[in-house]
Image (cartoon, rainbow, N blue to C red):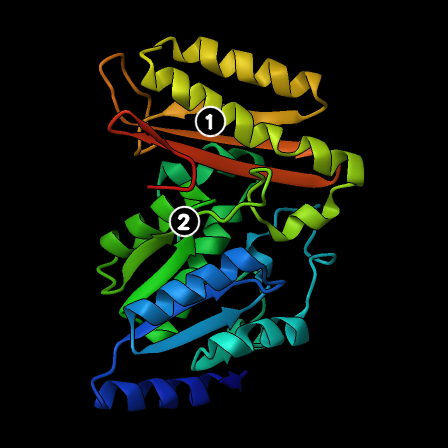
């Protein structure tokens, strides 16, 4: 496992793999790794001959007033977690390495209206920053495959659309959401939860699964499902930003739909929690399709 911080060294290594005809998978992360990230690395190793894990806390995807300065930087601990999985390269550049002309940068990637809806409505500029840095990382590493967690379902759709629109040859894959034993989706921001908040946090996933099961049972009053879940979360102390029943493409469903994506975001104390479940072929898929 090689730790790289320099773009030229990364490109030279990638060129060598290309000459050898070896396939490459990229797992982009912001570090502070947990079992969910490690599952993506395992998926990458099964899918390609060479694996790059990037660790970069991207300033472009933090909205004003968010936790960029407080976001945990834990490179030594991250490397220790990655060592047994043995990715070929961990690319951990400094901010001025990726943005030598400073940031915000002149060139941005905006993926249509989807970048401004749902999470994008509450985190202004977040998906523009995320799409911009992922496009940059794909340009630098030219991977055959890039793998992202399905916990952020909206982000996954945005990256897939970006790759399709810009004719990026990389296949964008999703990795199943990894959960704690009580159903809470693993996230680096879960550490912001107090002990009491941590006990309540799994309710978000519970509400999603229960609404999804009602859809499987034939319920089609989407507004009522959303309102009931929102009220239940409010009673438990959540500040719900959205709880939506949508199509898998994150458009408004109609009564004839039999496939759904249920997405939610809520504040609980200092933590912002996001989650989703899918309904396919009459089944609830809590960890992604």
**Front-most of 13 and 260?**
260
Residue 188 percent coordinates (x, y): 63, 53
The residue that mark 2 highlights is: 176
| The residue positioned farthest toward the right in the image shown | 195
Dividing the picture into quadrants, the one containing residue 234 is top right
Question: Is residue 108 in view from this perspective?
Answer: no
Residue at (46, 50) in percent of width and height: 128
Q: Position of residue 51 (x, y in %)?
A: 38, 75
Residue at the extreme front of the image, as rendered: 181
Q: Number of marks in the image?
A: 2
Q: Is residue 90 left or right of residue 215?
A: right
Q: Can you say whether 61 is above or below 78 in the image?
A: above
What SS does tag 2 mark? loop
Q: Nearer the viewer, residue 63 or 11?
A: 11
Q: Quadrant of residue 97?
A: bottom right
Counting residues from the N terminus, which is met first, the one under dot 1 or under dot 2? 2
Horizontal side of 25 relative to 223 (left or right) equals left
The structure residue drawn at horizontal position 26% and vertical position 77%, both measured from the top left corner, is 23
Q: Vertically, is 19 above or below 71? A: below
Residue at image location 30% in from the left, 78% down from the top: 49
Residue 64 drawn at (x, y percent): 66, 46
Q: Is residue 111 left or right of residue 76?
A: left
Residue 260: image tag: none
Mark 2 crowd level (few <14, some 14–19, many ≥20, 10 Å Cα): some
Whole-Å distance between the Cαs marked 1 and 2? 16 Å
Q: Is 187 or 94 nearer to us in this picture?
A: 187
Q: Quadrant of residue 260?
A: top left
Res. 131 in view = yes
Q: Quadrant of the C terminus?
A: top left
Q: Which label was assigned to residue 209?
A: 1
Q: Is residue 53 left or right of residue 30?
A: left
Which structural element holds mark 1?
helix
């Amino acid at each position: 496992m090689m730790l790289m911080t320099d773009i030229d060294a990364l490109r030279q290594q990638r060129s060598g793999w290309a000459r050898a005809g070896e396939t490459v998978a990229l797992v982009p992360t912001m570090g502070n790794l947990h079992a969910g990230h490690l599952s993506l690395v395992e998926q990458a190793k099964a899918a390609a001959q060479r694996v790059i894990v990037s660790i970069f806390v991207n300033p472009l995807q933090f909205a004003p007033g968010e936790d960029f300065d407080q976001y945990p930087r834990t490179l030594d601990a991250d490397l220790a977690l990655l060592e047994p999985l043995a990715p070929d390269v961990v690319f951990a550049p400094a901010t001025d390495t990726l943005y030598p002309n400073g940031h915000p940068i002149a060139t941005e990637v905006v993926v249509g209206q989807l970048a401004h809806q749902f999470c994008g409505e509450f985190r202004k500029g977040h998906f523009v920053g995320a799409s911009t840095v992922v496009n940059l990382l794909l340009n630098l590493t030219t991977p055959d495959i890039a793998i992202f967690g399905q916990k952020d379902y909206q982000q996954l759709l945005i990256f897939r659309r970006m790759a399709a629109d810009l004719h990026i040859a990389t296949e964008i894959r999703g990795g199943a959401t990894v959960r704690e034993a009580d159903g809470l989706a693993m996230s680096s921001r879960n550490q912001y939860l107090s002990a009491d908040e941590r006990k309540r946090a799994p309710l978000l996933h519970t509400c999603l699964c229960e609404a999804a099961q009602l859809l499987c049972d034939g319920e089609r009053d989407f507004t009522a499902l959303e309102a009931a879940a929102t009220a239940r979360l409010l009673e438990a102390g959540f500040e719900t930003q959205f709880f939506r029943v949508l199509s898998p493409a994150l458009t408004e469903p109609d009564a004839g739909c039999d496939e759904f994506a249920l997405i939610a975001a809520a504040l609980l104390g200092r933590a912002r929690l996001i989650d989703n479940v899918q309904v396919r072929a009459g089944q609830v898929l809590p960890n992604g399709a």
